[in-house]
Image (cartoon, rainbow, N blue to C red):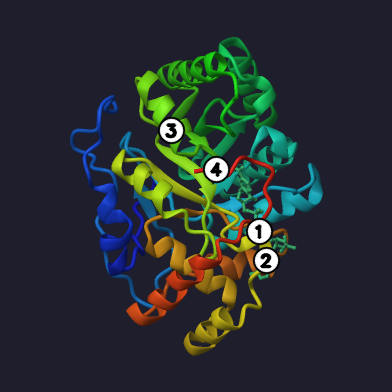
Amino acid sequence: MAPYTVDVQSSAAERGTGALLQKTKNPTRQDTTDSGYASPPREMGETSNNNLTVKLNDGNEIPQVALGVYKAPNGQETEDAVTAALDAGYRHIDSAARYLNEEACGRALNAWLQKTGTPREEVFITTKLWDADHGYEPTFNALNDSLKKFGLDYFDLYLIHSPSDDEEKRVASWRALEMAQRLGLVRSIGVSNFGKADLEGLLENATVVPAVNQIEVHPFCQRQELVDLCHQNGIMIEAYSPLARGNKLEDERVVAIAEKYGKTPAQVLLNWNAARGNVVLPKSLTAHRIQSNYQSFGFKLSPEDLDAIDALGAENYVTGSLHKTAD
Ligand SMILES: NC(=O)c1ccc[n+]([C@@H]2O[C@H](COP(=O)([O-])OP(=O)(O)OC[C@H]3O[C@@H](n4cnc5c(N)ncnc54)[C@H](OP(=O)(O)O)[C@@H]3O)[C@@H](O)[C@H]2O)c1
């Protein structure tokens, strides 16, 4: 993967990335003695693009912004959105078997790679194991199915979409992910929608510490305790619904801050999240929004404005994802 400029604001060191530098507890992960858990924050000028990456606990680099494709259809609209994102500079797509659009994502990706001559390794592809496919064999079947749909021979990141209620299956699915990683079918493995108890249970049985936990995080839903637990274990936060599904873009406090910087409310929400060291996954099927969301990182919110945005967390607004949100 090409070298990237990291656009983590200086405050991220104290607020997010700094926490990531803490040591993992047992079971510790893999071959990471020299990798650390996050790139140190570096300053970035107003005009830099945001091809930023952060380092996972397995040493792999992950682009800090992805196009999310939840509720995107398995057809031309999604192909156009993925193409627009890649053209705009995104190098990370976040899909899932459950989104039923892996074929459309894969068609757009493979066509774009061919058209531009970009090596596959330059784009980071994530997909997820759906709840109905938990268990050792079913996980492998689902993974192979997703690979086929995408037209790929490996994923950069494969996640358990949400924890199974069945303890045995939950452990078996994770073992399958560990094996898939050893076999090279996936480069990094992680979880999604795991609360505190889910994570603690997994860590007791895991050989590999998940590289990420993908959970809902935005200024109106900060989940600090769970975020802290992840950081203490070297687990990167991937913030889903980072725009609160568009439901908070007219909030007058966010609008006022956005106006101050000449930015859009969406750009402020994404900037806040990335400044915490989180990977952000804004979804859009609209070309100009896809582009403007990608331009959210070349400015720095003042400590006062970061504090003001932090204070919005008191609302604890959850978008209504069907997944478990218990921490
Ligand atoms: N692991 C999980 O369980 C889970 C759960 C939820 C989400 N996710 C991941 O996270 C991604 C993002 O979350 P999300 O889809 O729930 O919501 P989101 O990214 O917070 O918001 C998406 C909504 O905001 C609109 N939007 C995007 N950019 C905008 C802008 N600049 N100005 C105004 N409106 C804008 C989009 O509309 P248009 O499309 O019409 O532009 C869409 O309606 C998902 O796509 C998925 O990849 C994962």
Which amino acid type is marked by label 1?
Ala
Q: Which numbered disc, 3 or 2, marks the residue closer to the eye?
A: 3
Element type at marker 3?
helix
Which numbered disc flags the more N-terminal residue, 2 or 1? Answer: 1
Tell me how far mark 3 sits from mark 2, CA to CA. Answer: 29 Å
Tell me how far mark 3 sits from mark 1, CA to CA. Answer: 36 Å
Whether tag 4 and tag 2 are in contact, CB under 8 A, the answer is: no
Pointer 2 residue Cβ closer than 8 Å to ligand 1: yes
Which mark is on residue 84?
Answer: 1
Q: Which residue is mark 3?
A: 199
Q: Which residue is mark 2?
A: 246
Q: For ligand 1, which image quadrant applies? A: bottom right
Which amino acid type is marked by label 2?
Gly
Which numbered disc flags the more N-terminal residue, 3 or 2? Answer: 3
- x, y (%) of residue 97? 68, 32
Pointer 3 residue Cβ closer than 8 Å to ligand 1: no
Which mark is on residue 263?
Answer: none
Characterize the local packing of mark 3: few (<14), some (14-19) or many (20 or more) Cα atoms within 10 angstroms: many
Whether tag 1 and tag 4 are in contact, CB under 8 A, the answer is: no
Which amino acid type is marked by label 3?
Leu
Characterize the local packing of mark 1: few (<14), some (14-19) or many (20 or more) Cα atoms within 10 angstroms: many
Which numbered disc flags the more N-terminal residue, 3 or 1? Answer: 1
Element type at marker 1?
helix
- x, y (%) of residue 22? 22, 45
Tell me how far mark 2 sits from mark 1, CA to CA. Answer: 20 Å
Q: Which residue is mark 4?
A: 326
